[in-house]
Amino acid sequence: MKNAVGRDIPEYLLVNGKEVYQGKNYMDGKYLQKAAPRTRRYEAPQESKLVDSIRAALEQCGAKSGMTFSFHHHLRDGDFVVNQVMKVAIEEMGLEDITIAASSLGNAHDPIANYIEQGKVVGIQTSGIRGRMGEVVSAGKLKTPAIIRSHGGRPRAIEGGEVHIDIAFIAAPTSDCVGNCRGIGGKSNCGSMGYAMTDAKYADHVVVVTDCLVDFPNMPASVEAIDVDAVVVVDSIGNPKKIASAAARISQNPRDLMMAENVAKVIAATPWFKDGFSFQTGVGGPSLAANLFLEKYMDERGIKMGWAIGGICGPMVELLKKGKVGKVIDVQDFDLDAVNSINQTPGHYEMSASQYANPANKGAFVNKLDFVVLAALEIDTGFNVNVLTGSDGVLRGAPGGHPDTAAGSKVCIIVTPLTRGRMATVCEHVVTVTTPGDCVDVLVTDYGIAVNPLRPDLIECLDKAGIPHVTIESLKEKAYSLVGRPDDLEWEDKVVAVLEARDGTILDVVRKIKPYTLPED
Amino acid sequence: MEILKPAMAGTLESSDAQVTVEPMDGGIQLSLQSSVMNQYGRQIRETVLETLDRLEVKNAKVTVVDKGALDCTLKARVECAVFRSCGQSAANIPWGGAVR
Amino acid sequence: MIPRPKPERFRLRRTMMFMNAQKPGLIKDAYIYGCDSIMLDLEDAVAENQKDAARFSLYHALKTIDYGDTEVIVRINGLDTPHWQEDIRVCVAGGADGIRIAKCESANDVRTVETAVEKAEEEFGVEKGRTLLMAALESPKGILNAYEICSASDRLFGVAISGGDFRKCMQTVFQPDGVDMLAARGQMLVAARAAGVQCFDTVFTDLDNEEGFRSEVLQNKAMGFDGKSLINPKQIRLVHQVFAPTEKEVIQAEKIVRAYREQSAAGVGVFTVDGKMIDIAFIPGAERTLKLARVCGMYEGDLV
């Protein structure tokens, strides 16, 4: 069945009430039955929940084949926890048919690809998938299609019971002996633990894995002891160098800077750019650089940013410290400046993924967002964005908060170079739709700006401010004139991944790519 | 032109291509690797073969490692490798003739 | 193939940005940053053993890429190298707008290049005189011979000083106040103005020193330069800002040109604007201001 972004969704996926994507805010006003976990009572006073090993924790939680384990990705490419836990579960305990429900998976998790190939891991639910795991899933080696959700879609699915977590693993930079966890104060700090919070509340069992045990009570706790079954101390939960970079530097690439400046110009031309406005930006080159130029416009107009959300890094913390933004609310940290600031700098708070972006709760932050600046691997002439699949059709990306912030914000700006090497970023049809075009408002490229025709109000703003803009079709033609028109990718029928829209409807599917062979003479 | 000795042109930087030509009998043997194979492999191959054809290279082993080069870069790298293999790359290039 | 219009000898050249002709990722769209001219470099940026490869890249870039209104100039290798003749052939065949002669020291150097350019225009069937020239003065001898160089050819649109080599010859290094090259810049400017050609200042290489760059550009403008060579797109904006006329200058220029047209139609040669005496000598300057204002988006009238 064709959905609202023109993607053909196989009928066999439309079971148990699953629908195809119908457009923005389709689920608004509907009711959600929340799913409650079945949790163990710890009524008798307990000195400590420390157990000797990951295996002991798994056994205490009744781990068995067929279960769903959840993980969160605040340790990013430095994470050791997913691999440590899965190694014990599969290699030592011989568990099979395991589903991994993670907030994201990346290059750190290459070993999991082996378990997929062996058929031991049979399900993957995640926001991001990269590296070897992306390759093996794309090659059709996972038993069931991977389910890809946004950062807001994930807590929605957990709270609504679409994902039932048997055991949640919390990678904790610090924990006390009963499981009060924080993202700071240890040796592998990650700052915010926002993605883990819903897992801890909705999983049947919760295991904290830490490499820094601290005195009780570890306060204020990001994940609370009231939800934790067991605490395991390991040598190391991750490589600090890969968890948080030293400091996210603002790009010096002239192309990035030029685009960033145009992003700021667009923002400053809209009526929402006024004292107290709210803002989120990605950490990619031009997105992050937009901070710099935005500050200039804020100074010129004598206004301040009310609040900023998102994955946070140094430049935003800097603005907070300078008093140019009122509050920073943080679901994840990308560099040490941000890690060292959360809950320390006045006005820098932590939030859960649900609070950040869940479309099914009663007031996520994204819904009050004025501006978001985001990157894209591809954007097509319907303003649909792909941040998941490469030009070879292989899974190598992450929707993350992209679809949530795009849908919630008043102005969603995509910033990307028109071409990358020989790839046309602006194209006729994206490989996979990860953010639907009805949520995307403005495209800023190095060859010009295009405004979604769905937003005549923004077109008027740009015209008034004398900011030149063109149609997205003309940008696509320019891109093709530079790099040539790409050949269509060739797919097999088999669906390897299902892309859920943030509201839970099906936005797109990723099929198995046919191995490429050059034509002979 | 006749490929007299192995020669190479280009780099493995993004947006570039590294082209190697080597003497070989029995026609053109092209081996192509590309970072954009699925979408542009066919076009890259066509460009390389057309360029060789214009230079009247009939026999050669040609290896292209493409890092997302545009057609104009591919042509330039193939031509340079061929002229280098004949020791003729430094002067009197037929600009606008066989090189176009 | 992208046909380029015949190059204009005296056009606006506030910013001339150097680009290594050997780097495909750089030259494919250097025009997007909005500099007036790009300078594709076959000389210092290209290693000795890649001169051949750079020419192939350059040829196809010139033939394939639509640079639009951006002028495309190529810096060729010095006349003391084995490369310059083939450099000229490829520039002319590819249809470059102009050639920058490196290390130019005499009128004879300009004429040597001019002869080779003419030969190449003939060889490749290019309109005679199409390919413009500019000379880079990089040595004390070049500066001393600036006037003869500036007047050596009808193709020559301007001269530029090249600071790196010049400072070495003079046994000095960069000085924040510009005193290291003050005399040379002055002499070159005088020669260029006497010969009626344009004059460009050298690159500023310390990209992190924004204040230093600003003061050098302000000094360039105050001394009367037409523009400046650049090494990074992020330098473009400031130069265009500094070289833009003030609003007051634009209004004044418009009044002068308008009054001149009216008065000369009535047969009057000398008249007053806002109480200031004006004659024909003011007109080229006023027209230049209006043209510049138009490019800077400050003038939309029809006087120029």
Image (cartoon, rainbow, N blue to C red):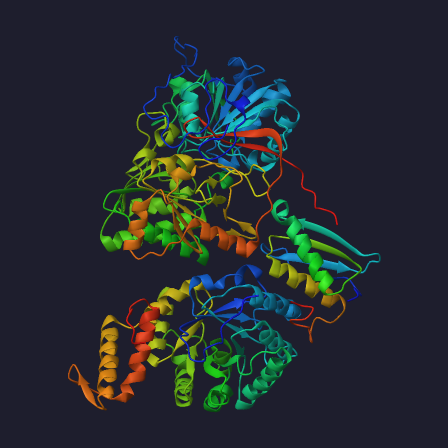
Q: Position of residue A360 (x, y in %)?
A: 36, 25
Quadrant in the rendering for residue A502: top left
A130 is higher (above) or lower (below) than C71: above
Residue A66 in sight in this render: yes
A188 is higher (above) or lower (below) than C81: above
Residue furthest to the front in view is C266
* Residue sitting nearer the eye, A326 or A91: A326
* Residue sitting nearer the eye, B35 or A335: B35
Q: Is residue C76 left or right of residue B8?
A: left
How many dots with numbers?
0
Q: Position of residue A134 (x, y in %)?
A: 58, 35
Q: Is residue A47 left or right of residue B77?
A: left
Q: Position of residue B75 (x, y in %)?
A: 65, 61
Instruction: Write the residue at 39% across / 87% down.
Output: C193
Quadrant in the rendering for residue B23: bottom right
Instruction: Write the residue at 40% across / 90% down.
Output: C194
A424 is higher (above) or lower (below) than C102: above
Q: Position of residue A336 (x, y in %)?
A: 42, 42
Residue A214 in sight in this render: no
Residue furthest to the left in view is C275
